Image: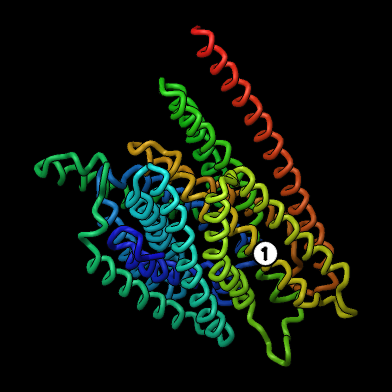
Amino acid sequence: MIKIMPKGIGKLYYIQMAITFSYAVIYSSLSLYLTKKIGFSVDFSAKTIGLFLAFNYTIQLLSGYISGRFLSNRSLMVISIVCQIIGFYLLSLNNNFTLYLGLCFFVIGCGINSTCYQCILVSRFGNDKLDSKKRESASFISYCFMNIGFLLGFTISGHYEAISNYNNIFIIGNVFNVIAIMLIYSNWDNIKDTDTVLSTICNDRLWKKRVIGVTCLLLCIPTMMIGFKFPTLSSSFVVLVGLAMFVYMYFKARSYSDINIKKNIYSFITLSLASVVFWMIYFVGPMSVSVFVKYNTDTHIWGYDIQPQWFNNINAAITICGAPLLAYVYQQLGKRRINVSETISFSIAILLISFSFFSLSEGVNHSMSNGMVASSWVVIHYVLQSAGELFIGPIGFAMVGRLAPPNLRGLMMGIFMISSGISASLASYFSSFIKVPATNTPDLTNSVYQSTFFKLGETGIVMAVILLTVSIVIYKTNKRASLKLNLDDKHGL
């Protein structure tokens, strides 16, 4: 499948894998690092992680605006990886000040490279039907490589977390960061910007644009440092910024005279808002599920003690195997002119992740005499969650590439990313209701976890029903409008 892709796509996949590894070790270890190494409470740790994720996706929105306007996507990717290297070093110093400063640098890094990578990937393809299919296939393959990075990151972090050696986790993360920079430079000519504002500007004006872009990124550091001190206020701010961007896109759509562009942007807004629910439920994982697995789950399987991070490998393994399979299924359905809309895919995703949390709730109902939950329920949770992710992750990125006008592609990719920032803030809000006693005794905490997991499942079911209902109404409205237009044309009106 790589052979039919544009030149340089293959190396892009490996760049994705390398930068994902760095994010994976932080994503899977941060909760336990904050509680075990730094000494945070479970509640304050959840708020910090929620803000870390929310800032990450807010930076992706900023990156979507800067990329292609002030700095090229490939230059921003190099800058982002350097920021991740600095972030890992500061985290390795193990004190509160460098903790927050390190998180700020790392957030800037992973926030920038996610948006830039996706913009580079989707811009390699045109807008005809053949390129649209190639773009969707490339998104699935890219998602597969991303999860190889997660698989490696979860495995390494779990090994060193077992012996509380977090510094080695950070060192290995930086090794992968250096590899990513080397891959970018070896692929430099193949990943240049196309159809961006910056690509049309003469060289004597470029330096001014670059100064503005770098200044914006540097200002993010003190802003986030202050934000980490006020997590609740900052999370609310992220939600408001995200919602404001959706309102902006609504009025932006209304300004277009082309009805197809309008419909595409309205579809983008609807699907992005639906994705908020999925990722909100999903992000409860690193905030609360990892702690639940650590203290409320019997993690012994066949005599081996499984680290909490290693359960995440179920997610990565299923995605690695499932992404190419689902891409093939979608291709075959397309050949038979069976169109699986993004709305159907997103609804399936939300239903699957809802059932994943119902499984954890049911697992608590069947807990052992000592209050511990069998690890098989956690396995079921991750299997269902991973299946759901397949129906929304790669398809969501391909959706932006298909619906976004070229001049709005970076901004719309950033807005799609910040919908995950809204999700992270809401997930932090949900996690704050999990009032875990300091003893972490399963008999005392199981009822709290069970109630929260069940509510998350219910939320997903309601949203899936709403999304399907709205899609049916829109489909019928568009069908009536098309029939009326055809009748008007037939009668010469």
How many discs mark residues in the rendered view? 1
Q: Residue furthest right?
A: 369
What colour scheme has been applied to the protein in the rendered image?
Answer: rainbow
Q: Is residue 154 above or below residue 58?
A: below
Image spot of residue 7 (x, y percent): 28, 61
Where residue 137 appears, x then y in whole percent?
46, 57
User: Percent x, y for residue 118?
Assistant: 40, 54
Q: Position of residue 339 (x, y in %)?
A: 58, 45
- Side of 415 relative to 487 (left or right): left
Toward the viewer: 369 or 471?
471
Q: Residue at x 76, y 81 (%)?
A: 298
Residue 414 visible in the picture: no
* Secondary structure category for the residue under label 1: helix
At x 33% / y 53%, what residue is drawn? 120
385 and 33: which one is in front?
Answer: 385
Decide if residue 7 is on the left or right side of residue 88. left
Residue 394 shows in the view: yes
Quarter of the N terminus within the rendering: bottom left
Q: Read off the residue under disc 1.
A: 288
- Circle 1 crowding by C-alpha within 10 Å: few under 14, some 14–19, many from 20: many
The residue lying toward the viewer, choosing from 210 and 262, is 262
Q: Residue at x 21, y 47 (%)?
A: 211
Is 158 drawn above or below residue 51 in the view shown? below
The residue furthest bottom is 303
Q: Residue furthest left?
A: 204
Front residue of this view, candidates 332 and 280 = 332
- Amino acid type at circle 1 is Ser
Please name the residue shown 90% across and 79% down the image: 369
The answer to which quarter of the image holds residue 283 is: bottom right
